[in-house]
Amino acid sequence: MTAGNWGFVVAAYGLAAVVLIAYWRFLVRREKELQGQGSGVSEPQASVSGHPRSEPASRSPLP
Amino acid sequence: MRRLLGGVTLAGLVAGLVMGFAIAPREATQGNVQRIMYLHVPSVWVAYLAFGVVLVASVVYLMRRAEAADRLAHASAEVGVLFTGLTIATGSIWGKPTWGAWWTWDARLTSVSILFVMYLGYLLLRGMIEDRERGARFAAVLGIVAAFNIPLVHFSVYWWRTLHQPPSLMKPGPGTMPDIIVAALLVNFAAFTLLYVYFVTRRARVLRLEAEAEA
Amino acid sequence: MVWKDLLVERRSKETLNALFFFGLLLLFVFQFALGPDRERLAGTLPGLLWLGFILSGLLALGRTFVVERENDCWEGLLLAPGDKSAIYVGKLAGNLLLMLAIEAILLVLFGFFFNLDLANVLPGLAVVIALGTVALAAVGTLFAAMTAQVRARELLFPVLLLPVEAPVLLATVKATEAVLLGETLGSVAHWLKLLAAADVVYVAVGVLTFDFVLEA
């Protein structure tokens, strides 16, 4: 009964890992961008797109 | 300071994983699928914690107009929605082998889904109001309404599911769990709470940097 | 204030007309979807009734501030001296009357089309409907003010209102179900208490926070 159910356990933990790590990466990347802006980098960093975000609403990327 | 928090969080998560997989035994009736509980239940707890913080931060904002309170509310709501979504997903994945269906209208999944949509709406509202100050004010009001709604959701859904329903439809509660499983659960609780704090502080920091950049 | 009353009156009449036809349309749709199966229809009647109420409510409540918005009176609202909560209570009362009127009409239509004997259950039904409507109107009025100036308000208003009203809808449907089956109000006392609690909380929050919503 339970041998085949490891798939579900892996799916759950895998999903959690993907979502949480993706959010963490979003935070890290956003912070780097903004700090780059703040310290007066001559060329504004291109807004990052394409990295997975798991929530729909967040502040729009800086121009 | 943040590195320390990050490090402790990571350590906590690893400890949680170890407890969940290596130390906790395979559960008698459900088998290994029960280990999903170590994800699902702490996620619910974090969600409620997050929304409680949203309430407090919202009230503080309306009384003091402190931008920091507004950022805290925003960050906490976002992390709360994240963990609420995770709760639903893990609950569904747990449900399939256990009850045979991806979705059961049981009390927890139903109430959590309502909360999910409520706070998703909160984030939508924030996203749709251009004026920063007005957005903060309105979000604070919504945060208060939503928080007061949580107990109403709880009781209504619980009564809906348990009155005139056989109790077997409810998920097994923590009443008769062996100590080792409780211990594993508590470790994961702690780990997830640390993760919540870590995420919220980073997110609030990003919000502050954004506000400074726009100024 | 008289000026305001007149405006409310005019808006209400056109809204009421539109909502009457909307209710009629809903009934036809329900009948087409569930008509042939008489028993299933009977079982779903409480849910359908409240579905009709909430859909009409969305339309009616969403238009709470349409007059101020369209006639550029919004600034006037924000700059009005004194306690803004009075505006909330005024709008709430207006919305309550409007919604109760729609619900009465819908109830009559339901009774007519689905051959319900409402005479016996009317008192109990009235209590449930009153309690539920206060909860709908209280939050609806508040959210209508908050979404009035948002560009996608027709989308955002229902998205905000419906999840908040989910427990209220649950309670009203369960209570209505019991009442229509001829049971006493006492048997659903817990649902009624939940509705009463919701009413108190929502109106209180509305009154206390409206000042913040209509701040200049």
Image (cartoon, coloured by chain):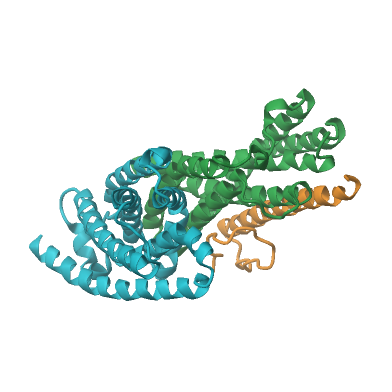
Chain colours: A orange, B green, C cyan
Whole-percent x, y for residue B148 in the image: 43, 42
Q: Residue at x 80, y 53 (%)?
A: A11
Closer to us: C103 or C206: C103
Whole-percent x, y for residue A63 in the image: 54, 69
Whole-percent x, y for residue B58 in the image: 42, 44
Which residue in the rendered view is the most extreme toward the top?
B179
Q: Quadrant of the C terminus of chain C?
A: bottom left
Count the numbered circles shown: 0
Camera sees residue B149: yes
Closer to us: C22 or C125: C125
Q: Residue at x 83, y 33 (%)?
A: B28
Closer to us: C196 or B127: C196
Whole-percent x, y for residue C25 in the image: 39, 76
Camera sees residue B212: no
Is B161 above or below relative to C120? above
Which residue in the rendered view is the most extreme toward the right?
A3
Q: Is residue C35 left or right of residue C8?
A: right
Q: Quadrant of the N terminus of chain C?
A: bottom left
Closer to us: C38 or C144: C38
Q: Residue at x 29, y 65 (%)?
A: C102
Q: Is residue B62 left or right of residue A60?
A: left
Is A9 above or below relative to C25? above
Which residue in the rendered view is the most extreme toward the left?
C2
